[in-house]
């Protein structure tokens, strides 16, 4: 049986300038895809309207090109809301999602990748207390002014073998609980149907673009367990995963978008070349 072609992705979010940590992760993803003679997507993860900016989207493309990274196709998540809604409706019809009335802060955290919280070293969505969970599996139709959670199976291990970090196991109800997959609109515009969470949008995009390998930071290991459950519920294949080590500043703190001094734009302005950047990896 022939090996399926490798399809990878670079998935920056336009909520700030790319820093050295982003650059190393994207470089590894690029090198692995190209070494396998594979295809590479650039996925603009712009579904957080309060934090995404066109100038950051333009800057990330320019910085990646400057670093020597190329891709074969592009997609933008804000163009794909009907696909995420269809996946949510599938989960609702199976009784695997339910309405949630939790706090706005919890819901705001769900629209971007957990590692984007500069105070967090890993997944930052708290263990859910099941306050809104129905006692039994209940099917329902989508209501546009509603938040939704995914109903995780109780107390089961979710295991996978990471291509870099080795065997991983997370247990539901201990490491994470029911997690947010849809946020209701922040506006009163009747055409605003709300937004998918990072977890749901990522799973749908990886499946529909046939991604075979996901390269990202090890702070998203727990998110991978969540996403495997979503993949199973939606009857999607599970790609291979490669979680990179995190880059840290001189004080040992994980790099985040607040590190302006280590942003690629700043390093470029200070005269560093792409070769200088790659030598830091």
Image (cartoon, rainbow, N blue to C red):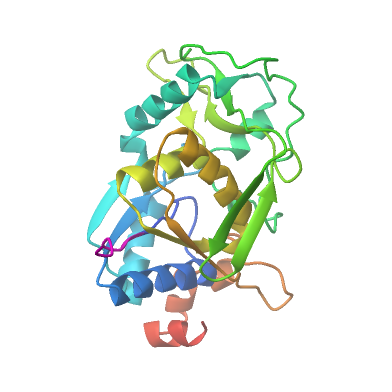
Residue 9 drawn above or below residue 143: below
Q: Residue at x 49, y 21 (%)?
A: 94
For the question of whether residue 50 can be seen, the reply is no
**How many numbered circles are shown?**
0
Residue 257 sits in which quadrant? bottom right
| Between 127 and 108, the one nearer to me in the picture | 127
Q: Residue at x 52, y 44 (%)?
A: 227
Residue 56 drawn above or below residue 202: below
Q: Residue furthest front?
A: 1
| Between 37 and 202, the one nearer to me in the picture | 37
x then y, percent, for residue 60: 38, 60
For the question of whether residue 132 can be seen, the reply is yes
- Magenta stretch in the rendered image: 1-8
Residue 190 sits in which quadrant? top left
Residue 36 drawn above or below residue 5: below
Instruction: Please tell me whether residue 5 belongs to the stretch shown in magenta.
Output: yes
| Between 263 and 121, the one nearer to me in the picture | 121
x then y, percent, for residue 255: 62, 67
The majority secondary structure of the magenta stretch comes to loop
Residue 75 drawn above or below residue 189: below
x then y, percent, for residue 197: 52, 36
Q: Residue at x 31, y 77 (%)?
A: 35
- Quarter of the image containing the N terminus? bottom left
Q: Residue at x 58, y 38 (%)?
A: 110
x then y, percent, for residue 17: 48, 60
Instruction: Please tell me whether residue 32 belongs to the stretch shown in magenta.
Output: no
């Amino acid at each position: 049986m022939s090996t399926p072609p490798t399809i990878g992705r670079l998935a920056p979010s336009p909520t700030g300038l790319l820093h050295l940590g982003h650059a190393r992760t994207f470089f590894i993803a690029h090198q692995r895809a190209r070494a396998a003679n594979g295809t590479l997507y650039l996925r603009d993860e712009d579904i957080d309207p309060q934090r995404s900016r066109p100038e950051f989207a333009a800057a990330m493309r320019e910085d990646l090109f400057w670093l020597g990274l190329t891709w074969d196709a592009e997609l933008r998540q804000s163009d794909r809301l009907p696909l995420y809604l269809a996946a949510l409706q599938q989960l609702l019809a199976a009784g695997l999602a339910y309405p949630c009335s939790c706090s706005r802060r919890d819901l705001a955290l769900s629209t971007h990748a957990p590692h984007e919280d500069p105070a967090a070293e890993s997944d930052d969505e708290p263990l859910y207390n099941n306050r809104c969970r129905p006692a039994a599996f209940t099917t329902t139709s989508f209501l546009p002014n509603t938040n939704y959670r995914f109903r995780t199976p109780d107390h089961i291990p979710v295991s996978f073998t990471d291509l870099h970090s080795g065997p991983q196991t997370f247990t539901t109800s201990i490491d994470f609980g029911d997690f947010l997959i849809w946020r209701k609109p922040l506006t009163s515009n009747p055409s605003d149907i709300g937004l998918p969470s990072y977890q749901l949008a990522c799973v749908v995009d990886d499946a529909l673009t046939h991604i075979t390998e996901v390269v990202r930071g090890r702070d998203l290991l727990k998110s991978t367990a969540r996403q495997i459950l979503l993949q199973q519920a939606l009857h999607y294949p599970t790609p291979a995963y490669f979680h990179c080590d995190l880059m840290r500043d001189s004080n040992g703190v994980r790099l985040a978008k607040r590190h302006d001094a280590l942003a690629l734009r700043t390093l470029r302005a200070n005269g560093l070349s792409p070769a200088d950047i790659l030598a830091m990896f």
